[in-house]
Amino acid sequence: MAGVLHDDEIPIDTGLVRALVDRAMPGHADLPVRRLDASGSTNALFRLGDNLLVRLPRQPGGSATIAKEAKWVPVLEPWLPAEVPAVVGVFAPDCGYPERWSVVRWIDGDHPDVVTPETPADRRREDLAADLAAVVHALRLAAVPSEAISDPGLRWYRGEPLATLDAMTRRNIGHCRALGDFELDLDAVERLWAEAMQLPGAADRVAPRWYHGDLAAENLLVRDGRLAAVLDFGGLAIGDPAVDLSVAWEVLDPPAREIFRSKLGVDDATWLRGRAWALCITVMIWYYWATMPQRRASRLAICRNVLADAGYVP
């Protein structure tokens, strides 16, 4: 089994996907199946022909996010100013595979480049900033039905008050120190996180709004510099949407970051909570340090951008 990321990883290979598709979608039995090089950490991804993508949870319990996406993404899609993967079908466990799995429409595009403090400013990123702001704004405006508020599957730690992540983040900083080669100033990271714990609203609950939860380069597609699609709504939930601001420190240079902020009209405290979320997510990378080098490079870049933005100079 290629690309094992988790201790409880479910064995998934091309043969299994071929068998699942042939039984669940016999009309597609003639389409080739190939594993994508950039499968995610939550789902293994396989191209089915030219127009479809098969997504299989990597770990036990992953059926919950597959079902959540199928239920709620169509509800949100009319609100969103970017394409989202249309669900073709959700299928039951079979062929010895224990989780529900899905097939969605393939969307063409490229992942946006990750920036660093040395990346030259590029006017094209200003368009991407406006597009991303439109998506975040649309999610915040989208109606939150009573069924969503009462659905425990739509509650996630990334929508909780930032202060509830203090102990976990400090543990993750410790794990990063143990790596011995984190490459960045973890003392500065720890000081900036401590400052974030004192931000107005860091411990407060807000009226629940929709948020994507994992708005990152690997879940975005661009075409000709414009945002084409938002992928992977497995982290979709309701709560404090500040976590979705963290994308600004991954794919936007400073001028574009300011456009993103201006379009959203967020206050200083909310903006800095978003930056703190970027830092919080960054120090989780110890878990994938040896297994996902591309994600590792992205998270290190985010950390450098956050530190530079906060005035920490190496």
Image (cartoon, helix red, strand yellow):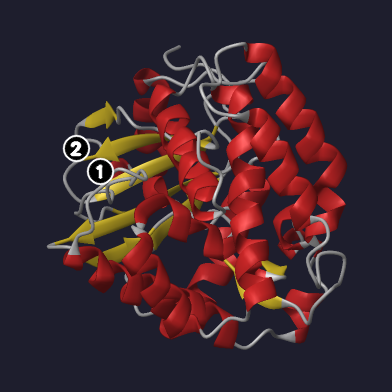
Label pair 2/1, CB-CB below 8 angstroms: yes
The three-letter amino acid code for the residue at tag 1 is His
Q: Quadrant of residue 178?
A: top right
Location of residue 264 with respect to 105 vertically, above or below:
below
- Quarter of the image with the N terminus is top left
Specify whether residue 189 is in view. yes
Return the residue at label 1: 28
Q: Quadrant of residue 239?
A: bottom right
Location of residue 98 with respect to 164 vertically, above or below:
above
In the depicted view, which residue is nearer to us: 130 or 307?
307
Return the residue at label 2: 31
The three-letter amino acid code for the residue at tag 2 is Leu
Q: Disc 2 to disc 1, how far (Cα)?
A: 6 Å
Helix, strand or loop for disc 1: helix
Furthest toward the left, the residue is 224
In the depicted view, which residue is nearer to us: 42 or 71?
42
